[in-house]
Amino acid sequence: MTELLNNDALSEEADKLAPEDGATRASMPPPPSVRRIRPREFRPSDVALLLLSALSAFSIVWILFTQLTLMNGPLGFVVIWIPLFLGMYWLVNRQLFTRQVAIDRLIGSIVTMGAILMMLPLVLLTIFVFQRGLKQLSWKALTSTQEGVVYAGAGSHGNAIGGVAHALVGTLEQVALAAIIGIPAAVLTAVFINEVGGRFTKSIRVIVTAMSGTPAIVAGVFIYSIWVLRFSYSGFAGALALAIILLPTVTRGTEEVLKVVHNDLREASIALAAPEWRTVWSVVLPTARSGLITSILLGIAVSIGETAPLIMTIFGNQVMNANPFSNPQMALSLLAYKQIKLPIQSQIDLGYTSALVLFILVFAVFILARLLGGNWKRRGGSRRSMLSAVRWTPASSMDPTSQEISNTKEGAVDV
Amino acid sequence: MTTTPTETRGGEILIKPITITTKRSSEDKAFRGLAKAAGLGTFVILFLIGLFLFIQAVPAFKSQGIGFLTNTGWHTTGKNPHFGVLSALTGSIIISIIALIVAIPVSIACALFINEYAPTRLLGIFPLKNFLTASVDLMAAVPSIIYGMWGFFVLQPHMTGLEVWLSDYLGFIPFFKNKTGIYTSSFLICGTVVGIMCMPIITSLCREVFSLTPDGEREGAMSLGASRARVIRDVVFPFSKGGMLGSIMLGLGRALGEAIAVAIIISLAFPVNTHVLQAGGNSIAALIALQWGSGGPLGTSALLAAGLVLFAITLAINMIASRIVNASKMAGR
C-alpha cells in the first residue's frame, strides 16, 4: 500500500513541478485522487473482509466435517478452520492490495490469535474455579474447620464436610508474617541497588533476578533443613519460606519504581544538606509511594498462592490453630491440594471451596494493587508490567522536556 | 576568604572546578551499612540454601555415591536402599521442553500484539493495552494449585483425544509411542499446563524487550515504506534477539521448578520414560512434593538432595538468563 502511495505522491509532485507542460498533461487521464493509507488503519471494508474470510473458511470446514467426512470434535474443527482462514485472508488481501499488505495482515491476525490464546486459559480458569466452588461457598463453610470430620463412605453426602476457616486463618497469618519479614528486606535491597550502589550492585541485580526464578519448593526444603529440623512444623516456618519467595519479587518491583523517581528531587534534597537516609526516607520513598504499594501487593498476591513450600513447613492440620509459632497450621492452597486427592466427592468439593476462596483473595489483592498504583504510568501511556526483571526506564525520559519530545515522536508513528 | 584557584593559559583565565567533600554522618554510615547488609543478604540466602541442602543431603549422597544421578528407582528404606534422580531429571527436562514448545509461540505473539498491534484504546473506549498487560500479570499471580486442578479436571479429558490421535498417526516417531494404552497423567498434559503457567512471565519479559527497540530505527523503517510485519522482522527482532533468549530461559527455569501442577497431574513412575503420551512419569519438583514424609530419614535426605540438584540447575539457568537479559537491556538503551 505504501508503494501505491509513493507512486501517487510522485505523480502529484510531477504535476507541481511541470505545470506549464500542458500539452502532454492534457492527453493523460486525470490523476486518481490520492488517499493517504496509514499503517494502523483498519476501515469498515477491512473488517468486512476479515469477517467474510472467517465465515467462508468456517463454512468450508463445516461442509467438510458434517457433510463429507463425519469427523467430529471441536478441537479438530478449530485446528482446520484457523489455517484455512489465514490462507484465505492472505489470498484475498493479495488479490485486492499488494503482497506487503497481505503479509502484514496475515502476521497481524496470527499475533491477535496469540493474544486470544493467552487470555483463554485465564478465562477458563476463572469459570472453572467459580463453577466448582461457588455452590458450596457459604458462611458455614467459611467459619467451620475440619474438626471432627469423618471420612465416611462415598455415599454419605451432606453434614460432615467441614469448612476452610482454619486454612483461611493460617494463610492470612503466614502471609502477614512473611510480609513483615520480607518486605523491609526487599525494599532495603532495592534501595541499595538503586540509591546507595557500590561494587556489588550489578551482581546483586543478577542474583535477585536469578533468585526470583528459584523454584518455590526449594525454598520449602531449605526452610525445612534450617528451621523445621531444629524446631518443629509451624506457621512461622511457612512464613519464612514465603518470605524467600516474596523477597526477589518485591525487590525487582521496588527497584523499577525507584528508578522512575526524578533525579532533580534527589539533588534538591542533597542541596538542602539532607543526609542520605533522609533523602531516601522523606523524598524518594514517598515519591514512589503508589508504585511501591503496587509492587508490594503484587509480591503478596504471588506468595498467597504458593503451595509447594508449605508442604514441608506448615505440614497441615484439621483443627483451628491460630498460633503460627507452634504446631502445624493449614493454608488454603495446601488444603485444596490435599482435598482434591481424596476419593470422596464431598471432600473434593471442600478443596474446590478452598481454591475459590484462595482465588478471590489473590484477585482482591491484585485489584487493590492496580487501583492504588493507578496514577503510576510509564511513558508509552500504558501501565508497566510489574513482572519486569530489569531496568529499562532511562531517567532522562522522565524529565518533562524529553517527555514532550517522545510524545510528539510517538504521535508521528502512532497515527 | 578563599581564592578561586585559577590558571592562565594564553591570556585566557581558566577556572578549575572545586570539589567539595563532606564527611558522611554516622547516621548515613549506619544507613548505608544497613542497605548494604540487605543487598548482600540475598547472596547469603542463596549461599545458605546451597550449604544447608548439601549438609542434609550428605547421607543420601554417601549411600548412593554417583549413583544418585544415574539410578532410576526410589527405595529409601530397607537394608539395601537404591535410589536416584535420573528419571526425575529426564522427566523435568521433557516437561520443560513441551512447556516451552507450548509457551514460546503464544507468548511472543501476545507480546507483539500488545506492543505493536494493539490500539491503546479499542473503539476509542476500552483500554485494551492496559487490560492485556494487567491480565498477563494476573495470570502470573494465579496460584499453581488452581492451574493444576484445572489441568487435571478440565484440560486432561479434552487432551486425551488429541493424544490418541497423535499416537495413532504419528506413533512411528519414538516419542509418540504409547505401549500402555493409557493416555491420562502423561508428560504432554503436564507440559501443556506448565507451558500455560510459563506464558505470562515470557510474555511480559518479551514485551519489555520489544518496547526497547529504538524509536529512530522503527520510524526509519516505517518512513521507508515498511509495513508493521516488516518492522517486526527487520527492526524489532534483530534488536531483541538476546532479550528474547533470556526471557525464554527464565521461562525454562520456571518450568523446571514447577511442583504442584505436575504433582497433581502426573502419576509417579520411576523408570525413565520418554513416551510423552503415556501415563506415568516423574519430575524432580513433583517427586519432592509427592514423596514428602514417606521413606524414613534417608528418604528425606534423598529428597533434600534432589532439591539441591534442582536448585543447582535452575540457579545456573537463571544466572545465565538474567545476565543475557540485563546485557540486552543495556544494549537496547
Image: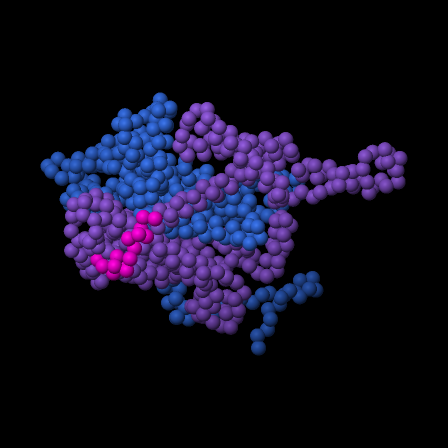
Q: Residue furthest bottom?
A: B1
The part of the chain drawn in magenta is A131-145
Image coords of residue A170 (percent x, y): 26, 58
Above or below residue B196? Residue A139 is: below
Which lettered chain is shown in purple? Answer: A
Q: Which quadrant is the N terminus of chain B positioned in?
A: bottom right
Q: How is the image coloured?
A: by chain
The residue located at (48%, 52%) in the rendering is B131
The residue located at (25%, 47%) in the rendering is A348
Image coords of residue A75 (percent x, y): 41, 34
Image coords of residue A131 (percent x, y): 34, 48
Q: Colour of chain B?
A: blue
Above or below residue A316? Residue A24 is: above
Answer yes or no: is residue B78 visible.
yes
Is residue A28 shown in magenta? no
Q: Residue furthest left?
A: B79
Above or below residue A169? Residue B212 is: above
The residue located at (23%, 34%) in the rendering is B270
Q: Is residue A45 left or right of residue B99?
A: right
Above or below residue A92? Residue B194 is: below
Camera-side residue of B329 and A351: A351
Image coords of residue A41 (percent x, y): 62, 44
Q: Residue furthest front?
A: A67
Q: Is residue A341 left or right of residue B4?
A: left
Q: Residue furthest top?
A: B172
Is residue A134 shown in magenta? yes
Camera-side residue of A45 and B31: A45
Answer yes or no: is residue A197 visible.
no
Camera-side residue of A27 and A152: A152
Q: In this view, does A252 lie to the left or right of B128?
A: left
Q: Quadrant of residue A108?
A: top right
The residue located at (17%, 37%) in the rendering is B75
